[in-house]
Image: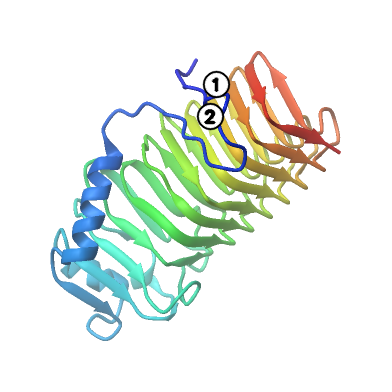
Amino acid sequence: MMNLSLPMANATPGKPRLTKVPRAIPVASVVLAFLVGATAAHAGAIRRVPTEYATIKAAVIAAETGDSILIAPGTYTGAENRAIDVGLKTLYIRGTGGAGTVVIDAENVANCFSFANSPFHYTSLQGLRLRRGNPCGIYVYDAAPVIMDSSIEDCVTGMLLARYHGTPSGLTIDGCVSTALKVSTGSNCEIRNSTIQNSAGAYGAGVQIIGASLLVANCVIRGNDASSDGGAVYCESGGVVLQDVAITGNRCAGAGGGIRLLNSSATLEYTTLSRNLAVSAAGGVSSAGSSSVVGHSILWG
């Protein structure tokens, strides 16, 4: 069972309450230091796509740790603009021109971005619109990317996080066909200030947690449809903490239209489940072999 501290009972409703989730390494401090350095001092060269480098991969190959890659508005397709892997580098990759203007379209033939076996390299992705990644929009295994202020759309799986200890934030994950967010293999991470919606999958169309721990804070999970259990959230042999989360309009053919827990632990604080549907059982929360704490929350409709 996870060792998760609960928010204070007298916390002010409507304001975020922080829950400490133990991490194997002090990710937040290192990430903050890198982002401040990269943003304020531009610790390395600035490489621009497509004016200086025709493709994103060309800029990544040329870049060195500490460099910034700025991508101009446009839609980027083809083999040199997908399956992007920065390797053992720490880069700052940012879309320019405002939300949704930089589109990386993997055309259903590869991941958009992959990060693997680089747990001490904190590449930052920001301001990107990632589309049609197959199998994933973003794939992470034993790596530490900083993922923020981006959208992931129409992928097979939006984001897969394995052995990950970071905090993605400011995301919209939409329209995935095999779960929007999968968290597995010893991950102990968070997702904040994000929307997960309109996705499908067998177990946990919105969020699937297996053998891992996840804190979900200030998020909306809506309109997801699971062909088996857990329309919004499915957690098996792991743990989930939900703080200031709205779970609404989700559906499943099995148990747990909102949440399905199996041999897991769960904490719900200042969370609302409304108008979720299960064809088999438990439109709100279905729990088997699990331990749950529910406070200051609404289960309705």
- Give the label on residue 216, or none: none
295, above or below 205, in the image: above
Report the residue marked by disc 1: 237
Residue 87 seen anywhere in this rendered image of the structure? no
Q: Measuring from the top left, give residue 135's x and y in whole percent.
A: 50, 52
The residue lying toward the viewer, choosing from 91 and 97, is: 97
Ranked by sequence position, the earlier of labels 2 and 1 is 2
180, above or below 93, in the image: above
Report the residue marked by disc 2: 210
The residue lying toward the viewer, choosing from 243 and 248, is: 243
77, above or below 235, in the image: below
Task: State the scheme by which the image is colored.
Answer: rainbow
Q: Residue furthest bottom?
A: 51
| Residue at 54% across, 41% down | 217
The image quadrant of residue 235 is: top right
Dot 1 amino acid type: Ser
Q: Measuring from the top left, give residue 116's x and y in whole percent.
A: 31, 45
Contact, mark 2 vs mark 1 (Cβ under 8 Å): yes
Dot 2 amino acid type: Ile
Residue 150 is left or right of residue 223, and the answer is: left
Residue 90 is left or right of residue 204, and the answer is: left
The residue lying toward the viewer, choosing from 153 and 109, is: 153
Q: Measuring from the top left, give residue 17's x and y in whole percent.
A: 51, 35
Mark 1 element type: loop
Disc 2 packing (10 Å; few <14; some 14–19; many ≥20)? many
| Residue at 30% across, 65% down | 93
Disc 1 packing (10 Å; few <14; some 14–19; many ≥20)? some
Measured in 3D between alpha carbons, the distance from the residue under mark 2 to the one under mark 1, in whole angstroms, is 6 Å
Mark 2 element type: strand
